């Protein structure tokens, strides 16, 4: 191929083609169209071109009726005389597509080979057709010769103008055979059909994601390059698409031309209006393939999919926390900036989001739009209602990864997580005690204020916590659902059962930091602590005696009332305390569990051991107020007191002689029986 243009380097098969081509470089300005400014290499070509403005078509194909304004166009059409009945004789050997003209086939083959022989001299972009190159040239010159007679919008090509005119007339000649949706352009129809077939011919070379539209692929590529060439002149925000920038500008102007015919809400974009209308019709066309949940918008479905895969693509640049939704990341960002632009007009409380403010306002108005269909309970938020529904169905979708415990609410799972980490973020401002849950802190506050909002309907007793009231109710009903598997003892609360089980296993988890004594119950440890501090908060209303434990006070009160609820099954003796009854049982069985560490002597009662230990230490805490004599036991002091008062309660049954001490009576009785227990070690 030797016929090459020395100006642009283009090659031709024939010398005549080169000569014709050179005219475009050596073009005469006298051959310029006065209407559209287009220039031609010859005056004859200009004359033919002028017919396109007059729309005169003097050349008719006989028998067919089709007219052309140039004879060459008619001849070209005549070559396709067999095309009228739909015959296409020129087939592509690669894809099988047929064409009427061989020239169209050659051009089509370039799509498969990738040959683009027509480069733009300005930007270097190449094209498979010369016509496409010429059309592209207008993007550099900015020439738009075809203007709409209705709105004045101008176009570089006549076909674009005709397509545009359909937006005014509303003509949509191309209808989908599947769903019936109509389009103004054939290309749009073909692209739409891919939504039914699922064909995605345009794949990203970087990540492999495929699209049904080429335009969507081009827009997607910007997400990899990060290029944002279109910047808002008002706020400086940048976008990767001009169309997105134009839509964004509506947020500054406040113009909302698309109004909902049902509720009157207005939108800046038609797409937003259509999506909004689904909230009235209830149409949700996008369903999750995993859980079946449906959405009105495709992007909502895609974001929802991340909840199943666990993918979190949106990470905070400050703290690194990741989110599945971009909106969640944006809202999270405000927690770092502290900006709260939405302020309540009633109480002045500020929020980072408008929707949070609207929800908050319901706390003032008391409006609760979302009611449970089962129990009738109403909520201010729809998501709260949905979570509440799980309390009826028993569904628990939120499981702890450590312990496996499941919850109906995500918030409960998050709070439960603190029990593993030990984090307590909620501290009391009065005593400093910290809690893992805000609700626990609020309930704890009642212990300082004394507020008891939960009263028993039977006995009137009030409680600071609802849970305590419910547990108290079991004392009236007698219900005890928690039974020990070892001894069969039943309890009203699971916590009491677990504590009781420690009595079988011998586990004592709670150690005193002062003396090291171990306890099975935390409350027992707290009560024991009073023995070191000397605190006694429980006072008897009759005699004024104080005790460290409420149980000891109640037992003491029986000494005033004379109530003795604990009777020995062997001898019938009754006691005010259960502990005394148990010790009494040892006197019948002969069991002595309390041994002295010094001499080894054993006792059935702990108090007897403590008294005995004083005989080794010499401690005598009980002194007579008359003579000053001291004793190790209170009982011995009381008996000694009879020697001063002259009271003799112990009388001999044989001779009637009376004694102040029982020991003296027993010694006297030996004078009647002749028993002599004391023998001389020397003479016997």
Image (cartoon, grey):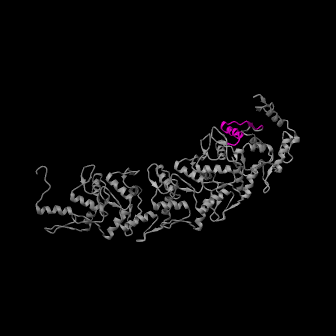
Residue at the far top in the pictured view: 2
Task: From this view, report whether residue 480 is shown above or below residue 217.
Answer: below
Find out whether residue 468 is within the magenta segment. Answer: no
Task: From this view, report whether residue 128 is shown above or below residue 371.
Answer: above
Q: Position of residue 83 (x, y in %)?
A: 70, 45
Q: For the N terminus, give its image quadrant.
A: top right
Find out whether residue 108 is within the magenta segment. Answer: yes
Q: Is residue 523 visible?
A: yes
Q: Is residue 39 visible?
A: no
Task: From this view, report whether residue 301 is shown above or below residue 450.
Answer: above
Q: Along the horizontal axis of the image, is 556 left or right of 349?
A: left
Task: From this view, report whether residue 377 is shown above or below residue 248.
Answer: below
Q: Along the horizontal axis of the image, is 628 left or right of 378?
A: left
- Identify which residue is drawn at 22% across, 68% down: 649
Q: Position of residue 437 (x, y in %)?
A: 50, 56
- Identify which residue is drawn at 80% across, 30% down: 6
Q: Write down the region rendered in magenta.
A: 99-121
Residue at the far right in the pictured view: 30
- Identify which residue is drawn at 35% across, 66% down: 478
Q: Along the horizontal axis of the image, is 175 left or right of 631?
A: right
Q: Position of residue 644 (x, y in %)?
A: 26, 66
Q: Position of residue 463 (x, y in %)?
A: 45, 66
- The front one of 528 and 57 is 57
């Amino acid at each position: 191929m030797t016929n090459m243009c020395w100006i642009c380097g283009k090659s031709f098969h024939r010398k005549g083609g080169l000569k014709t081509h050179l005219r475009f470089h050596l073009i005469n300005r006298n051959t310029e169209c006065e209407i559209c400014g287009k220039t031609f290499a010859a005056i004859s070509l200009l004359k033919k071109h002028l017919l396109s403005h007059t729309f005169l078509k003097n050349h008719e194909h006989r028998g067919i009726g089709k007219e052309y304004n140039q004879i060459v166009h008619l001849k070209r059409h005549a070559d396709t005389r067999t095309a009228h009945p739909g015959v296409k004789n020129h087939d592509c050997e690669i894809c099988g597509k047929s064409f009427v003209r061989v020239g169209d086939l050659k051009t089509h083959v370039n799509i498969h080979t990738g040959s683009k022989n027509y480069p733009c001299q300005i930007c270097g972009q190449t094209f498979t057709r010369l016509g496409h190159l010429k059309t592209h040239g207008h993007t550099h010159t900015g020439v738009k010769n075809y203007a709409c007679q209705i709105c004045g919008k101008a176009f570089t090509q006549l076909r674009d103008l005709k397509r545009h005119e359909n937006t005014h007339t509303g003509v949509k000649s191309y209808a989908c055979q599947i769903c019936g949706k109509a389009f103004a352009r054939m290309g749009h129809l073909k692209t739409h059909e891919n939504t039914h077939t699922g064909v995605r011919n345009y794949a990203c070379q970087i990540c492999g994601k495929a699209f049904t539209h080429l335009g969507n692929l081009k827009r997607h590529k910007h997400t990899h390059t990060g290029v944002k060439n279109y910047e808002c002149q008002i706020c400086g925000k940048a976008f990767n698409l001009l169309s997105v920038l134009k839509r964004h500008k509506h947020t500054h102007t406040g113009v909302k031309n698309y109004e909902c015919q049902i509720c009157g809400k207005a939108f800046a974009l038609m797409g937003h209006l259509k999506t909004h209308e689904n909230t009235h019709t209830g149409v949700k066309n996008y369903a999750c393939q995993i859980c079946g949940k449906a959405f009105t918008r495709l992007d909502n479905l895609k974001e929802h999919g991340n909840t199943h895969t666990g993918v979190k693509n949106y990470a905070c640049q400050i703290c690194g926390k990741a989110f599945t939704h971009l909106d969640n990341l944006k809202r999270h960002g405000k927690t770092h900036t502290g900006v709260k632009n939405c302020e309540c007009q009633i109480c002045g409380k500020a929020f980072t989001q408008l929707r949070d403010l609207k929800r908050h306002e319901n706390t003032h108005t008391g409006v609760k739009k979302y009611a449970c269909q089962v129990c009738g309970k109403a909520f201010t938020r729809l998501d709260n209602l949905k979570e509440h529904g799980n309390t009826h169905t028993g569904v628990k979708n939120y499981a702890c990864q450590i312990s496996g415990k499941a919850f109906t609410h995500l918030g409960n799972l998050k709070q439960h997580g603190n029990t593993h980490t030990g984090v307590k973020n909620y501290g009391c401002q009065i005593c400093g005690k910290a809690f893992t849950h805000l609700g626990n802190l609020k309930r704890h506050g009642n212990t300082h204020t004394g507020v008891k909002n939960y009263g028993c309907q039977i006995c009137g007793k009030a409680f600071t916590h609802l849970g305590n009231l419910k547990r108290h109710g079991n004392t009236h009903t007698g219900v005890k659902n928690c039974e020990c598997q070892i001894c069969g003892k039943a309890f009203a609360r699971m916590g009491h059962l677990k504590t009781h089980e420690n009595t079988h296993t011998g586990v004592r988890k709670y150690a005193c930091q002062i003396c090291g004594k171990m306890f099975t119950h935390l409350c027992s440890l707290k009560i024991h602590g009073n023995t070191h501090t000397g605190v006694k908060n429980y006072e008897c209303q009759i005699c004024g005696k104080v005790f460290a434990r409420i149980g000891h006070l109640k037992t003491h009160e029986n000494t005033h009332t004379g109530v003795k609820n604990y009777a020995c099954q062997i001898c019938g003796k009754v006691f005010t305390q259960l502990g005394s009854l148990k010790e009494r049982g040892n006197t019948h069985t002969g069991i002595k569990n309390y041994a002295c560490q010094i001499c080894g002597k054993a006792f059935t009662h702990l108090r007897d051991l403590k008294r005995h230990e004083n005989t080794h230490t010499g401690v005598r805490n009980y002194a007579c107020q008359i003579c000053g004599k001291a004793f190790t036991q209170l009982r011995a002091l009381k008996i000694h007191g009879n020697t001063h008062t002259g009271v003799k309660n112990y009388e001999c049954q044989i001779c009637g002689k009376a004694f102040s001490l029982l020991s003296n009576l027993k010694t006297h009785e030996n004078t009647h029986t002749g028993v002599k227990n004391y023998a001389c070690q020397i003479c016997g």
